[in-house]
Amino acid sequence: MAREFRFGFGLHAAPRQSSVQDWAHRAEDMGYDVLHVPDHLGAPAPFPTLMTAAAATEKLHVGTFVLNAGFYKPALLARDVMAMHDLTGGRLELGLGTGYVEAEFKAAEIPYPSARERVDHLRHVVEYLGEHAPDVPILIAGNGNRVLTIAARRAHIIGLTGGDPEGPDGDPLAERIEFVRSAAGERFDDLELNIAITAMPIDDTGIPDLSITRRFLPELSDEELLRTPGVLAGSPGDIADEIRRYRDAYGVTYITVQQPHAEAFAKVIELLR
């Protein structure tokens, strides 16, 4: 039996308590299941912001999308995670990634490890949390083989972040999911698959604003960007059909959009529930 859809959106700007509370209330009213906060210097501090959102709501889950594991020592992170778990009534979902912005490590006065070292540290953090915060669902986002192997074996939710476009030469998303299936073995059916949407229409034109996607995939043309999994185009009905295709073809049932898309995507949520 296919999983039910879940929907989240990333809160990137909410400078005051009242604005965080307002977004949290609106998220519940619009049908979102999870409010996410990223982990970048210059963005809202994840845990205080999420606690504020959770305190203003009753059912809305809150989560990180995603914490930079390289910023944290496992025992200290586990302490904060369990406090959030208890104070939110079990509504915290912890998203983790390796961290990739070298300038942020420098600003935080933390040495910037190699890619291999960052993945090793992510595995260490996840293993520690599995022992000391076992009740907190963990999402791991990534695209490389080593990160997806850790996710397949340790996480509850897989954030599929690959940006390669679908085309006549293959289907990169399907390939990554098959890799996860192989690495997960018997636990694959228990995993929830997530895709983060970085571009979609916010007006009646049906044309997505590609500016966010282009920051992550500067080497791709606009035509190629439109064929990546994180970009949606067309009417709300068209987008709803595409989300159903993600579920039917790939098993993806958890969709995350960005703050500028929240109101427009709420029309799609109505069509999918």
Image (cartoon, rainbow, N blue to C red):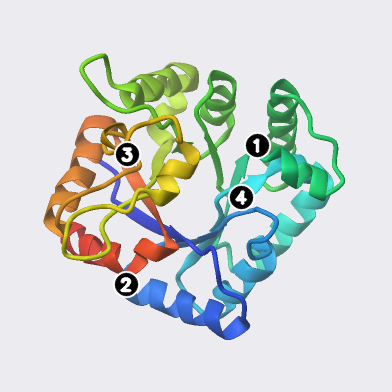
- Name the residue type under label 3: Val
The residue at 49%/78% (across/down) is 57
The percent position of residue 23, horizontal first and vertical second, equals 46, 76
- Name the residue type under label 1: Tyr
Q: Nearer the viewer, residue 16 or 188?
A: 16
Tell me the residue that label 2 is attached to.
Answer: 30
Q: Give the alpha-carbon distance from disc 3 to disc 2, as whole Å.
A: 21 Å
Local crowd at mark 2 within 10 Å, few (<14), some, or many (≥20)?
Answer: some
The residue at 68%/69% (across/down) is 48
Q: Using residue 237 as the reference point, say whether residue 246 is left or right of it.
A: right
The percent position of residue 11, horizontal first and vertical second, equals 51, 64
Please identify, in this view, whether the residue under mark 3 or under mark 1 is nearer the observer.
1
Tell me the residue that label 3 is attached to.
Answer: 252
Q: Give the alpha-carbon distance from disc 4 to disc 1, as whole Å.
A: 27 Å
Q: Give the alpha-carbon distance from disc 1 to disc 2, as whole Å.
A: 32 Å
Q: Determine whether label 1 and label 2 are within 8 Å by CB.
A: no
Helix, strand or loop at label 4? It is loop
Helix, strand or loop at label 3? It is strand
